[in-house]
Image: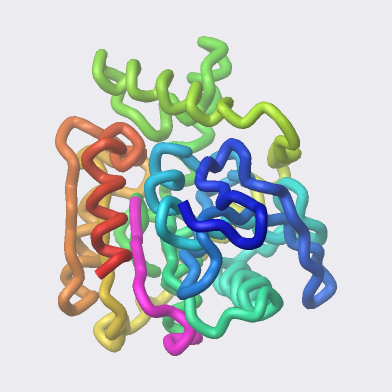
Protein backbone atom coordinates (compact mmCIF):
# COMPACT_ATOMS: atom_id res chain seq x y z
CA UNK A 1 0.00 0.00 0.00
CA UNK A 2 1.46 3.36 -0.96
CA UNK A 3 1.62 6.04 1.70
CA UNK A 4 1.81 9.81 1.74
CA UNK A 5 4.12 10.83 4.52
CA UNK A 6 3.02 8.68 7.45
CA UNK A 7 -0.62 8.41 6.49
CA UNK A 8 -1.71 5.06 5.11
CA UNK A 9 -4.05 5.40 2.14
CA UNK A 10 -7.69 4.88 3.11
CA UNK A 11 -9.37 2.47 0.69
CA UNK A 12 -12.48 1.68 2.74
CA UNK A 13 -15.49 3.93 2.10
CA UNK A 14 -16.70 3.28 5.65
CA UNK A 15 -13.61 5.17 6.86
CA UNK A 16 -13.37 7.89 4.20
CA UNK A 17 -12.98 11.29 5.85
CA UNK A 18 -15.84 13.78 5.47
CA UNK A 19 -14.71 17.08 3.99
CA UNK A 20 -16.27 20.32 2.72
CA UNK A 21 -15.33 22.89 0.10
CA UNK A 22 -17.10 26.17 -0.66
CA UNK A 23 -17.66 27.41 -4.20
CA UNK A 24 -20.32 29.44 -6.00
CA UNK A 25 -22.05 30.26 -2.71
CA UNK A 26 -22.46 26.58 -1.81
CA UNK A 27 -20.58 24.50 0.74
CA UNK A 28 -20.30 21.04 -0.81
CA UNK A 29 -19.90 18.02 1.45
CA UNK A 30 -17.72 15.28 0.03
CA UNK A 31 -15.62 12.26 0.93
CA UNK A 32 -12.42 11.09 -0.64
CA UNK A 33 -10.39 7.91 -0.47
CA UNK A 34 -7.87 5.91 -2.44
CA UNK A 35 -4.38 6.96 -3.54
CA UNK A 36 -4.10 10.62 -4.60
CA UNK A 37 -2.67 11.56 -7.97
CA UNK A 38 -3.79 10.87 -11.50
CA UNK A 39 -7.34 11.43 -12.73
CA UNK A 40 -9.91 11.07 -9.94
CA UNK A 41 -13.12 9.05 -10.26
CA UNK A 42 -16.02 11.28 -9.17
CA UNK A 43 -19.24 9.50 -8.18
CA UNK A 44 -22.59 11.10 -9.14
CA UNK A 45 -25.31 9.88 -6.80
CA UNK A 46 -28.95 8.86 -7.33
CA UNK A 47 -32.33 10.43 -6.51
CA UNK A 48 -32.69 11.73 -2.92
CA UNK A 49 -29.34 10.18 -2.07
CA UNK A 50 -26.56 11.35 0.22
CA UNK A 51 -22.94 10.31 0.71
CA UNK A 52 -24.18 7.29 2.68
CA UNK A 53 -26.01 5.81 -0.32
CA UNK A 54 -22.98 4.43 -2.15
CA UNK A 55 -22.41 0.68 -2.01
CA UNK A 56 -18.99 0.09 -0.43
CA UNK A 57 -18.64 -3.08 -2.55
CA UNK A 58 -18.52 -0.88 -5.65
CA UNK A 59 -16.48 2.02 -4.24
CA UNK A 60 -13.81 0.07 -2.33
CA UNK A 61 -12.53 -1.98 -5.31
CA UNK A 62 -12.24 1.20 -7.42
CA UNK A 63 -10.54 3.10 -4.56
CA UNK A 64 -7.87 0.41 -4.28
CA UNK A 65 -5.91 2.04 -7.11
CA UNK A 66 -7.79 5.27 -7.84
CA UNK A 67 -8.50 8.56 -6.10
CA UNK A 68 -12.28 8.39 -5.49
CA UNK A 69 -14.51 11.36 -4.62
CA UNK A 70 -18.19 11.25 -3.67
CA UNK A 71 -20.21 14.40 -3.04
CA UNK A 72 -23.62 15.68 -1.98
CA UNK A 73 -25.54 17.67 -4.58
CA UNK A 74 -26.46 21.24 -3.59
CA UNK A 75 -29.17 21.25 -0.91
CA UNK A 76 -28.78 17.51 -0.21
CA UNK A 77 -27.31 15.85 2.88
CA UNK A 78 -24.61 18.09 4.34
CA UNK A 79 -24.28 20.36 1.27
CA UNK A 80 -25.84 23.82 1.68
CA UNK A 81 -28.16 25.73 -0.65
CA UNK A 82 -31.42 25.03 -2.45
CA UNK A 83 -31.98 21.81 -4.40
CA UNK A 84 -31.98 22.58 -8.16
CA UNK A 85 -35.13 21.61 -10.06
CA UNK A 86 -33.32 20.78 -13.30
CA UNK A 87 -30.71 18.18 -14.23
CA UNK A 88 -28.72 20.87 -16.08
CA UNK A 89 -28.47 23.04 -12.93
CA UNK A 90 -27.23 19.97 -11.01
CA UNK A 91 -24.59 19.48 -13.71
CA UNK A 92 -23.52 23.12 -13.32
CA UNK A 93 -23.13 22.53 -9.57
CA UNK A 94 -21.09 19.38 -10.19
CA UNK A 95 -18.82 21.35 -12.53
CA UNK A 96 -18.40 24.11 -9.91
CA UNK A 97 -17.49 21.47 -7.31
CA UNK A 98 -14.98 19.68 -9.56
CA UNK A 99 -13.25 22.93 -10.55
CA UNK A 100 -13.17 24.08 -6.90
CA UNK A 101 -11.19 20.95 -6.08
CA UNK A 102 -8.75 21.98 -8.81
CA UNK A 103 -9.39 19.18 -11.31
CA UNK A 104 -9.54 19.80 -15.04
CA UNK A 105 -10.04 16.14 -15.99
CA UNK A 106 -12.07 13.43 -14.24
CA UNK A 107 -13.64 10.03 -14.79
CA UNK A 108 -17.31 9.83 -13.80
CA UNK A 109 -19.10 6.91 -12.17
CA UNK A 110 -22.83 7.63 -12.11
CA UNK A 111 -26.04 5.91 -11.09
CA UNK A 112 -29.66 6.79 -11.98
CA UNK A 113 -30.28 10.56 -11.61
CA UNK A 114 -26.49 10.87 -11.32
CA UNK A 115 -26.22 9.43 -14.82
CA UNK A 116 -28.53 12.13 -16.16
CA UNK A 117 -26.41 14.79 -14.43
CA UNK A 118 -23.26 13.18 -15.87
CA UNK A 119 -24.70 13.32 -19.41
CA UNK A 120 -25.65 16.99 -19.01
CA UNK A 121 -22.14 17.74 -17.73
CA UNK A 122 -20.31 15.91 -20.52
CA UNK A 123 -22.46 17.55 -23.21
CA UNK A 124 -21.66 21.01 -21.81
CA UNK A 125 -18.03 20.39 -20.77
CA UNK A 126 -16.72 17.52 -22.90
CA UNK A 127 -13.08 18.38 -22.14
CA UNK A 128 -13.49 17.75 -18.43
CA UNK A 129 -14.57 14.11 -18.72
CA UNK A 130 -12.17 11.36 -19.78
CA UNK A 131 -14.34 8.27 -19.14
CA UNK A 132 -17.96 7.75 -18.31
CA UNK A 133 -19.75 4.99 -16.39
CA UNK A 134 -23.55 5.29 -16.72
CA UNK A 135 -25.58 2.85 -14.64
CA UNK A 136 -29.36 2.57 -14.15
CA UNK A 137 -29.95 5.69 -16.21
CA UNK A 138 -31.37 7.06 -19.46
CA UNK A 139 -31.08 9.90 -21.96
CA UNK A 140 -32.97 13.20 -22.00
CA UNK A 141 -36.32 12.68 -23.72
CA UNK A 142 -36.04 8.94 -23.02
CA UNK A 143 -39.25 6.93 -23.19
CA UNK A 144 -41.18 6.81 -19.89
CA UNK A 145 -38.55 8.67 -17.79
CA UNK A 146 -41.29 11.12 -16.89
CA UNK A 147 -43.13 8.23 -15.17
CA UNK A 148 -40.34 7.78 -12.59
CA UNK A 149 -42.20 9.90 -10.03
CA UNK A 150 -45.27 7.67 -10.07
CA UNK A 151 -43.25 4.49 -9.60
CA UNK A 152 -41.19 6.12 -6.84
CA UNK A 153 -44.15 7.35 -4.77
CA UNK A 154 -45.92 4.00 -5.16
CA UNK A 155 -42.88 2.04 -3.94
CA UNK A 156 -42.26 4.45 -1.04
CA UNK A 157 -45.82 3.75 0.05
CA UNK A 158 -45.40 -0.03 -0.36
CA UNK A 159 -42.17 0.11 1.67
CA UNK A 160 -43.80 2.18 4.42
CA UNK A 161 -46.58 -0.39 4.76
CA UNK A 162 -44.04 -3.17 5.32
CA UNK A 163 -41.61 -0.96 7.31
CA UNK A 164 -38.89 -1.62 4.73
CA UNK A 165 -36.39 0.65 3.04
CA UNK A 166 -37.96 2.01 -0.21
CA UNK A 167 -34.75 1.03 -2.05
CA UNK A 168 -35.63 -2.64 -1.49
CA UNK A 169 -38.70 -2.06 -3.70
CA UNK A 170 -37.28 0.52 -6.10
CA UNK A 171 -33.91 -1.12 -6.84
CA UNK A 172 -34.62 -4.85 -6.62
CA UNK A 173 -37.10 -7.39 -7.98
CA UNK A 174 -39.72 -8.65 -5.54
CA UNK A 175 -38.70 -12.29 -5.94
CA UNK A 176 -36.60 -14.36 -3.52
CA UNK A 177 -33.28 -13.34 -5.12
CA UNK A 178 -34.24 -9.67 -5.33
CA UNK A 179 -35.54 -9.49 -1.77
CA UNK A 180 -32.36 -11.06 -0.36
CA UNK A 181 -30.16 -8.78 -2.49
CA UNK A 182 -32.14 -5.71 -1.39
CA UNK A 183 -31.75 -6.53 2.30
CA UNK A 184 -28.01 -7.20 1.86
CA UNK A 185 -27.57 -3.90 -0.01
CA UNK A 186 -29.37 -1.84 2.64
CA UNK A 187 -27.27 -3.54 5.32
CA UNK A 188 -24.02 -2.67 3.48
CA UNK A 189 -25.06 0.99 3.47
CA UNK A 190 -24.96 0.87 7.29
CA UNK A 191 -21.31 -0.23 7.47
CA UNK A 192 -20.14 3.32 8.12
CA UNK A 193 -20.95 4.00 11.75
CA UNK A 194 -19.29 7.36 12.41
CA UNK A 195 -19.78 10.76 10.89
CA UNK A 196 -22.80 9.74 8.83
CA UNK A 197 -24.53 12.18 6.50
CA UNK A 198 -27.79 14.01 7.20
CA UNK A 199 -30.63 12.09 5.48
CA UNK A 200 -32.23 13.77 2.45
CA UNK A 201 -35.39 15.70 3.26
CA UNK A 202 -38.73 15.03 1.54
CA UNK A 203 -38.36 18.31 -0.35
CA UNK A 204 -35.18 16.94 -1.96
CA UNK A 205 -37.11 13.97 -3.33
CA UNK A 206 -39.96 16.13 -4.63
CA UNK A 207 -37.69 18.70 -6.31
CA UNK A 208 -35.41 16.08 -7.86
CA UNK A 209 -38.39 14.12 -9.18
CA UNK A 210 -39.55 17.35 -10.84
CA UNK A 211 -36.10 17.63 -12.45
CA UNK A 212 -36.26 14.03 -13.71
CA UNK A 213 -39.72 14.64 -15.18
CA UNK A 214 -38.38 17.70 -17.06
CA UNK A 215 -35.43 15.66 -18.28
CA UNK A 216 -37.77 12.95 -19.55
CA UNK A 217 -39.86 15.50 -21.43
CA UNK A 218 -36.99 17.54 -22.86
CA UNK A 219 -35.46 17.31 -26.33
CA UNK A 220 -32.81 14.59 -26.63
CA UNK A 221 -29.19 15.77 -26.60
CA UNK A 222 -26.96 14.69 -29.47
CA UNK A 223 -24.96 11.99 -27.74
CA UNK A 224 -23.35 10.84 -31.01
CA UNK A 225 -20.78 13.63 -30.44
CA UNK A 226 -19.48 11.99 -27.27
CA UNK A 227 -15.97 10.64 -27.79
CA UNK A 228 -15.45 9.46 -24.21
CA UNK A 229 -15.14 5.70 -23.64
CA UNK A 230 -18.45 4.83 -21.97
CA UNK A 231 -19.57 1.82 -19.94
CA UNK A 232 -23.35 1.39 -19.55
CA UNK A 233 -24.88 -1.08 -17.09
CA UNK A 234 -28.27 -2.01 -15.67
CA UNK A 235 -30.49 -4.89 -14.59
CA UNK A 236 -32.86 -6.39 -17.18
CA UNK A 237 -35.99 -5.37 -15.26
CA UNK A 238 -35.50 -1.73 -14.22
CA UNK A 239 -38.89 -0.33 -13.23
CA UNK A 240 -37.56 3.13 -12.33
CA UNK A 241 -35.55 3.99 -15.44
CA UNK A 242 -36.65 1.27 -17.91
CA UNK A 243 -33.82 -1.05 -19.03
CA UNK A 244 -34.51 -0.26 -22.71
CA UNK A 245 -33.11 3.21 -22.01
CA UNK A 246 -29.69 1.67 -21.29
CA UNK A 247 -29.88 0.05 -24.74
CA UNK A 248 -30.97 3.42 -26.13
CA UNK A 249 -27.89 5.11 -24.60
CA UNK A 250 -25.68 2.31 -25.97
CA UNK A 251 -27.02 2.93 -29.50
CA UNK A 252 -26.53 6.70 -29.22
CA UNK A 253 -23.01 6.69 -27.74
CA UNK A 254 -20.60 5.39 -30.36
CA UNK A 255 -18.32 2.62 -29.16
CA UNK A 256 -19.98 2.36 -25.75
CA UNK A 257 -20.06 -0.96 -23.89
CA UNK A 258 -23.30 -2.36 -22.47
CA UNK A 259 -23.73 -4.82 -19.59
CA UNK A 260 -27.24 -6.00 -18.65
CA UNK A 261 -27.56 -8.30 -15.64
CA UNK A 262 -30.29 -10.98 -15.58
CA UNK A 263 -33.12 -11.23 -13.05
CA UNK A 264 -32.37 -7.84 -11.52
CA UNK A 265 -33.80 -4.34 -11.43
CA UNK A 266 -32.63 -0.73 -11.13
CA UNK A 267 -29.99 -1.84 -8.61
CA UNK A 268 -28.61 -4.58 -10.87
CA UNK A 269 -25.04 -3.37 -10.34
CA UNK A 270 -25.49 -3.68 -6.56
CA UNK A 271 -27.11 -7.12 -6.79
CA UNK A 272 -24.26 -8.26 -9.07
CA UNK A 273 -21.51 -6.23 -7.36
CA UNK A 274 -19.11 -9.20 -7.36
CA UNK A 275 -19.32 -9.39 -11.16
CA UNK A 276 -19.71 -5.67 -11.86
CA UNK A 277 -17.01 -4.12 -9.65
CA UNK A 278 -14.14 -5.86 -11.53
CA UNK A 279 -15.70 -4.82 -14.87
CA UNK A 280 -15.84 -1.18 -13.73
CA UNK A 281 -12.28 -1.34 -12.30
CA UNK A 282 -10.93 -2.78 -15.56
CA UNK A 283 -12.81 -0.23 -17.70
CA UNK A 284 -11.57 2.71 -15.62
CA UNK A 285 -7.98 1.40 -15.57
CA UNK A 286 -7.68 0.92 -19.33
Q: Quadrant of residue 89?
A: bottom right
**Residue 155 visible, this angle:** no
Where is 190 relative to 266, above or below? above
Tell me residue 273's x, y (percent).
30, 38
- Type of colouring: rainbow
Where is 163 relative to 249, above or below? above
Tell me residue 83's x, y (percent).
72, 58
The residue lying furthest to the right in this view is 25
* Residue range of the region highlighted in magenta in the rendering: 124-135
Where is 97 relative to 280, above or below? below
Residue at image coords 72%, 49%: 18
Of 165 and 157, nearer the camera is 165
Q: Is residue 42 left or right of residue 71?
A: left
The verdict on residue 52 being magenta is no
Residue at image coords 35%, 60%: 134
Residue at image coords 38%, 79%: 130
Tell me residue 90's x, y (percent).
61, 67
Q: Quadrant of residue 248?
A: bottom left
Q: Is residue 122 left or right of residue 195?
A: left
**Residue 99 visible, this angle:** yes
Amino acid sequence: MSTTGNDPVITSYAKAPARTISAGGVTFAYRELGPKGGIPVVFFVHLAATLDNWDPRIIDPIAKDRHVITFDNRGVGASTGEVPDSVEAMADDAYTFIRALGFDKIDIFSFSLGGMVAQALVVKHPDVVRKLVLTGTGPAGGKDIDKVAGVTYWDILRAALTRSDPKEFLFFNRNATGKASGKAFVKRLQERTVDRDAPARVKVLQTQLKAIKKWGRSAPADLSKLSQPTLIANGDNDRMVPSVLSEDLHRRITGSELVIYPDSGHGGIFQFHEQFAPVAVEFLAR
